[in-house]
Image (tube, rainbow, N blue to C red):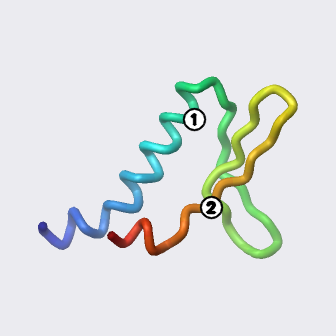
Amino acid sequence: MSYNLKSQKGAYLENIIYNDLINRGYDVVIGNLEQGEIDFIATYFEKKFILKLPIYYLMI
């Protein structure tokens, strides 16, 4: 696998998760907390989910 493809795996994974959340009807935004960036804040009606992808999944 080329270096460029390996370096993009994290972005591909985030896009897959983002698109899946949108397809399931969630409102999705990229968020920030005092501790740093989180990947997504997904809202479905009154429920809010905060998602942070572990870095080791993004580097496989």
Percent across and percent down for residue 32 are 74, 61
**Mark 1 residue crowding within 10 angstroms, few (<14) / some (14–19) / many (20+):** some
Location of the C terminus (image quadrant):
bottom left
Location of the N terminus (image quadrant):
bottom left
Q: Which numbered dot is residue 21? A: 1
Q: Residue at x 71, y 72 (%)?
A: 36
Tell me the element at label 2.
loop
Percent across and percent down for residue 44 are 75, 30
User: In which quadrant of the rendered view does residue 48 lie?
Assistant: top right
Residue type at mark 2: give it: Lys
Which sits earlier in the primary sequence, circle 2 or circle 1? 1
User: In which quadrant of the rendered view does residue 10 lie?
Assistant: bottom left
Q: Which residue is mark 2?
A: 52
Q: Is residue 10 left or right of residue 52?
A: left
Q: Residue furthest right?
A: 46
**Mark 2 residue crowding within 10 angstroms, few (<14) / some (14–19) / many (20+):** few
Q: Residue at x 69, y 32 (%)?
A: 27
Vertical position of residue 32 compared to residue 13: above or below: below
**Observer-nearest residue: 57 or 12?**
57
Vertical position of residue 12 compared to residue 38: above or below: above
Percent across and percent down for residue 18 are 52, 41
Tell me the element at label 1.
helix
Residue type at mark 1: give it: Leu
Q: Residue at x 57, y 30 (%)?
A: 22
Number of numbered discs present?
Answer: 2
**Observer-nearest residue: 37 or 53?**
53
